Image (spheres, rainbow, N blue to C red):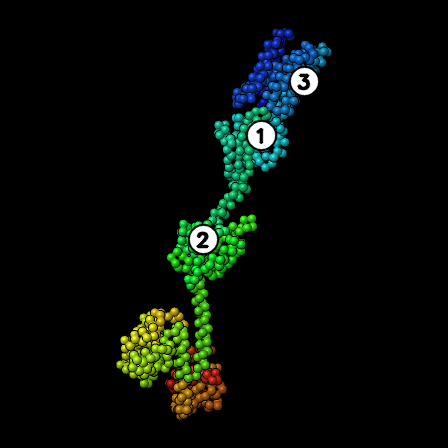
Amino acid sequence: MLLRNILYIYGILFPLIWIVHKILGTNTLLDTGTRLLIFVLCFVVGYGIQKSSGKRRDTLRYIAYLLLISITYYNIHLCYISQFSLENIVMNLVVYFLTILTLDNAPMMFGYFALALIGNFISSVIVLDKTRFYHFIIPTVLSYLGSAIVQYLRIKERNFLFLKEDYIEKSKFSEKDGVIITDTDTRILYINDIAKKYVDSGFDKEFLLLTKVIFPVDELDQKIGYPRIIELSNDSHIEVHYSRVEYQSDPCFMIRIFDRTNEIRSDREYRRVHKIQSEIIEFAGEGIVYLNNEGFVQYLNEKALKLLDLTREEIIGETFHNKVHHSNFDGTTYDDDTFPVKETYLEGKSFHIPLDVFWKKDGSFFYTEYISTPVLESGRPVGAVLIFRDISGKKKQDDLDKQYRDELLHLSNTSNRFLEIYTQSELFRYIAEELHSITNGSAIVVNSFDPDLDIFTIRAHAGFGKYFTELYNLLGRDLKGFYYSLDSQDPAYELNRTDNTKSGIEDGLFELKFGNFNRKICKQIEYLVSSKKIFILSLNYKGYFLGNVIIFHKQEVFENSTMVEVFQNQACINLHRKIMERSIFREKFRYDTVIQETSIFYCELNMDGIVLFINPALEELLDYSREELVGKNWWSVVQPGMKYEEIQEFLKHIKVSPTLRSKSSITTKKNIQFDSTWDWIYKSNPDSGDEIITGIGLEVNY
């Protein structure tokens, strides 16, 4: 478009200038005043072009084009009438000056000036040769040709700050940054490939030239000196700088675009991670404390404040050791030098302390586990980070687990000890001593019950020690004699056949439920043995009442009631076993005689079901002789209909419950079946370790 305007102006003005030349004549075309006026106009127009913008600038450019054409024509005229002179040189300098103002860059300026000189030179040759036909045409055509070439270069080749575009592309600020140059009307004069990528219009770079940027000039003026960050649609970010520069000698705007996507993403990720880290630290499930290199607290998170029951104002600026680590759990004070964290912030050592105590504001403490890590600057410790947590629950559970393991070991040893006891007197004494140990020193009285005589008998005691004299004076007799003297208004068995253990532990009974044990006497005994509660443990096995244990306990509850209860069950089982063994062995001879002569069916089996003995009555019933049946499997011969699972269930229960009643069908040698009811008794010989099942047939339906 610019080239077209130039051609139009040249095409219209050239004939007009030629007509003026013919009218005014050769010598009067331009006098000295006219030359001065042209010079003044050239400088005024040049100054106006430099200072103006928009339409006014374009108008002044057109005036400059007219002056340029006029001076070019006058230059040709000088060549026509004379040789080169001072006037010729001055006029060529004016042409050079106007070329700077209108064509804006050095390559086009030198190109135009060179073509003008060539035209003048050819014109001079023509004048000297008197070939007048070419003295207008040749220089004019050459001048037009020079202007056309220069304007083409202007469109084809955009320069920045009087530098070629390839040099701009290599400049340091353009390697990664986008550059857009606009004129004062915000029309794009230059845009590099990087800027075009951010514009992302879909048009070629050549098409974008001379198109307008969207924002108005006054808004662009306000942006100068104030860089801004713009977020693009593809989650990328650019930083845009606006400034005024000169482009091809004209004032214009330069928009520099810097890719800040990586920086912003990194910063955003850093802030996100920092926020997460801050939240993790602040709301972590563990207490976090920062100490400086003098041991003063600089920071605590919320969890630390909650665990220590402190506010920030109460702890910030205080020494951590003096505030929360001053004493051991037993009240003995710690020296500051024993605090491991001190070595952390002074010497840079790390520590893991699995068990320690921290103190709260209210004077209570909690068990804690903590890790101390140094904070280093240039390799030197400047503080310490302390991470701790409350392990009171874990410590309590560990103590309970240890106690449980100790109790299991103790009970295991107890079970073995029960098996080593041969007499009832030893068993009662062991029960008293063991309960005295389990209950942490309580006074124990163990009584046995004789259902035939319906009386209690004190069999053993433990833990009374020095109180025996006081008890004797109080009761008027020793403890054993006092028990023998008890009167029972109701049968003791009826009062004690239920297990009183649970109610005793819960209610802390102050009266014993056998006979008429006076409440006042019980309280006096309680006072003498310095106990807080009196508990009763019934020795009751499967409804068979064996006796009871009176415990004068020093606390209101049992700390290890489970262990006491387990021991009670073991004592009942073994006491019942001893009573049964004693009864069996005591009456062995009588039983042997009775078994041989009685009509009751009797047999003995081992745990594999092998028949060891049958009495004559059972021989007659089954039609087997003793020799035929001994050594055979009872369940294969006599009870063939009994399933394997039923046999295993029977053996399992007979060991747990030494007396077991069952109904079953038996088969004789003649394959006759009878329904029968049997009592089965489990016996073991502690000397040999043999286990025997005795069967007594109570009822047979023929």
Q: Can the viewer see residue 606 in this picture?
A: no
Looking at marks 3 and 2 on the same chain, the residue that comes earlier in the sequence is marked by: 3
Query: Which structural element holds mark 3?
Result: helix
**Which amino acid is tagged 1?**
Tyr
Point 48% across, 30% down: residue: 222
The residues tagged by marks 3 and 1 sit, at their Cα atoms, a distance apart of 31 Å
Residue 523 percent location from the top left of the image: 29, 74
Residue 254 percent location from the top left of the image: 55, 30
Residue occupied by mark 2: 319
Q: Nearer the viewer, residue 168 or 608?
A: 168
- Mark 2 crowdedness (10 Å alpha carbons): few <14, some 14-19, many ≥20: some
The numbered dot on residue 482 is none
Point 47% across, 82% down: residue: 607
- Mark 3 crowdedness (10 Å alpha carbons): few <14, some 14-19, many ≥20: some
Point 53% across, 21% down: residue: 52
Q: Nearer the viewer, residue 663 or 613?
A: 613
The C terminus lies in quadrant:
bottom left
The numbered dot on residue 117 is 3
Q: Is residue 200 left or right of residue 325?
A: right
**Which amino acid is tagged 2?**
Thr
Query: Which structural element holds mark 1?
Result: strand
Residue occupied by mark 1: 190
